[in-house]
Image: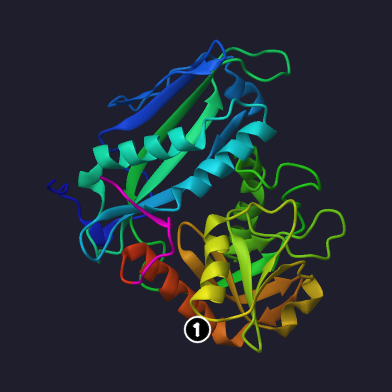
């Protein structure tokens, strides 16, 4: 299929309407088959559950053009599993993983003219989401829901190259113990908006959230997991029941162990030990890994010397290996890369 006439090299990270999206409704206790539609508008009642009680969940993923010209997406089954877990936690009907993957692939295929060419630095962002759609005035779960998938071409997360981030230790809490921090619910992101706006006003790129119970352990930022590298080359990621289980983080841990031969640990990480790490990064769908140069803890600066001007050496190897897997230049583990046919 001929690609759309888009200036791929100068795309930003924003919404561009594409031709098709997938829609399925849940009514009378069952999901309908669902279908592609050209209508991008969502029409709901003013009393819809999503508007009154924030009953909404979502996922984020990408489609790529590989070096040999195939269109692929990365580990969609894990996104489907995570959405199943999110739905169950918010008393929403589970949209089965198999149907989720099928809907994602159909939506990408229908919009393949918007998948940026290999080497452009751009990708097709894919956003599956679900919300309570019927009228709810009492505090209770909705009885009707809508599941949708839309796509939008986006440019590289870093314009003009990678720039190490400066992060502050945040005084706000992201998630309560035994709360909803481990699911991808809109409400988690809504509560982080004030904190990130405030961080930007103070000259910081992001927030480092600590555990709400003791405020001694590192959790995550508003939209990414942390990844650290020790001075002897071990990869360490924070472990907590209130951290979102990032698919990128899980993949990087496996890459560290199986491709780079590094020891990788998933454990509690204490704020006091940050000074002992050689490298720090944020990992997620948007940029894979964003290097962190400095963490500021109420005036106390913790600098990662290898990340002050560029990615540290281990972080860079992790980034290059995972993006190579995604783009088809490095052989992927079984099931990681799914071709859109």
- In the figure, residue 219 lies in which quadrant? bottom right
- Left or right of 122 on screen, residue 287: right
Farthest right residue in view: 214
Q: What residue appears at the point 61 percent right and 44 percent down from the top-left corner?
A: 189
Viewer-side residue, 18 vs 23: 23
Q: What residue appears at the point 77 percent right and 42 percent down from the top-left corner?
A: 179
| The magenta stretch spans residue 318 | no
User: Residue 245: x and y, percent?
Assistant: 62, 53
Tell me the quarter of the image containing the C terminus.
Answer: top left
For the record, the magenta segment spans 330-341
Farthest front residue in view: 334
The residue that mark 1 highlights is 309
Q: What residue appears at the point 49 percent right and 35 percent down from the top-left corner?
A: 129
| The magenta stretch spans residue 334 | yes
User: Residue 227: x and y, percent?
Assistant: 61, 70
User: Residue 313: x and y, percent?
Assistant: 51, 85
Farthest left residue in view: 2
């Amino acid at each position: 299929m001929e690609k759309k006439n888009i200036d791929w090299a100068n795309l930003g990270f924003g919404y561009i309407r594409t031709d098709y999206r997938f829609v399925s409704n849940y009514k009378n206790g069952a999901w309908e088959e669902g279908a592609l539609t050209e209508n991008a508008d969502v029409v709901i009642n003013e009393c819809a559950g999503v508007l009154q009680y924030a009953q909404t969940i979502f996922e984020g993923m990408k489609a790529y053009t590989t070096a040999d010209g195939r269109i692929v997406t990365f580990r969609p089954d894990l996104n489907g599993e995570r959405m199943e877990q999110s739905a169950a936690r918010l008393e929403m009907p589970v949209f089965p993983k198999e149907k989720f993957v099928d809907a994602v692939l159909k939506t990408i295929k229908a919009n393949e003219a918007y998948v940026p060419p290999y080497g452009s630095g751009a990708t097709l962002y894919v956003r599956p989401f679900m919300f309570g759609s019927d009228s709810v005035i009492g505090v209770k779960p909705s009885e009707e829901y809508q599941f949708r998938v839309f796509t939008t071409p986006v440019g590289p997360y870093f314009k003009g190259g990678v720039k190490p981030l400066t992060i502050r230790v945040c005084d706000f809490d992201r998630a309560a113990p035994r709360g909803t921090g481990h699911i991808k619910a809109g409400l988690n992101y809504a509560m982080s908006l004030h904190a990130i706006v405030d961080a930007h006003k103070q000259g910081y790129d992001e927030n480092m959230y600590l555990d709400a119970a003791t405020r001694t352990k590192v959790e995550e930022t508003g939209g990414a997991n942390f990844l650290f590298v020790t001075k002897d080359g071990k990869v360490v990621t924070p472990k907590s029941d209130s951290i979102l289980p990032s698919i990128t983080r899980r993949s990087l841990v496996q890459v560290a162990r199986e491709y780079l031969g590094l020891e990788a640990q998933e454990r509690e990480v204490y704020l006091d030990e940050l000074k002992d790490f050689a490298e720090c990064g944020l990992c997620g769908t948007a940029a894979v890994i964003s290097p962190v140069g400095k963490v500021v803890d109420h005036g106390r600066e913790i600098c990662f010397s290898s990340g002050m001007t560029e990615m540290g050496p281990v972080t860079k190897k992790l980034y290059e290996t995972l993006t190579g897997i995604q783009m088809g230049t490095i052989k992927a583990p079984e099931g990681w890369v799914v071709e859109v046919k």
